[in-house]
Amino acid sequence: MKTLAGFLCGLMFGVGLVVSGMSDPAKVLNFLDLFGAWDPSLAFVMGGAVLTSFVGYSYVLKRPSPVLSDVFHLPTKNDVDGQMLTGAALFGVGWGLGGFCPGPAFTALPLMSTGILAFLPALLIGMWAGRMAPLLRTGAA
């Protein structure tokens, strides 16, 4: 049941990304181009996502436990450190250069455009490198 629920949530998320235009890098880059062909429509997409998340979390966290698990798995870390800032900066630079963030990149894969075929391998290598960096520092790799 968990697998089916995960699949349906992922499918709904992917459809939402496509319908909202988040899988179109030109739309995303136009949103980031404040002094050119600025397209503010993605601000409404982000605002809708924040509002939906706020209402959803407020409702769900009133329950004693999740429907398909024994406990809620919520983040416990709340401090800002160098790793978080570096990760956020790299994410922002990648989003600004490529016009994709990870979710929309995967929804755009069926388009097989040159941009997505270059971005996805770079994304996967970056994710792998990010996981390996702490191991290399400690010598555990």
Image: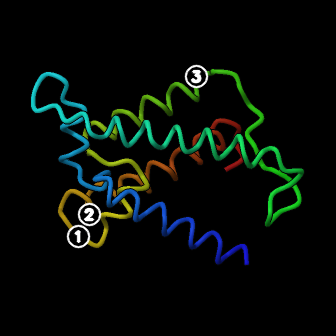
What is the number of the mark on residue 112? 1
106 vs 30, left or right, is right
Q: Quadrant of residue 108?
A: bottom left
Identify the secondary structure beneath mark 2: helix
Do labels 1 and 2 touch, CB within 8 Å? yes
Do labels 2 and 3 touch, CB within 8 Å? no
* Quadrant holding the N terminus: bottom right
Residue linked to disc 2:
117
The front one of 67 and 111 is 67
Residue linked to disc 3:
82
Residue 62 is situated, as x and y percent measured from the top left of the image, at: 82, 44
What is the number of the mark on residue 40? none
- Residue type at numbered disc 1: Met
- Residue type at numbered disc 2: Leu
Please report the residue visible at 35 percent of the width from the left and 57 percent of the height from the top.
105
Real-space CA distance between mark 3 and mark 1, rounded to the nearest whole angstrom: 35 Å
- Residue type at numbered disc 3: Gly
As displayed, is residue 95 above or below residue 109?
A: above
Residue 79 is situated, as x and y percent measured from the top left of the image, at: 69, 22
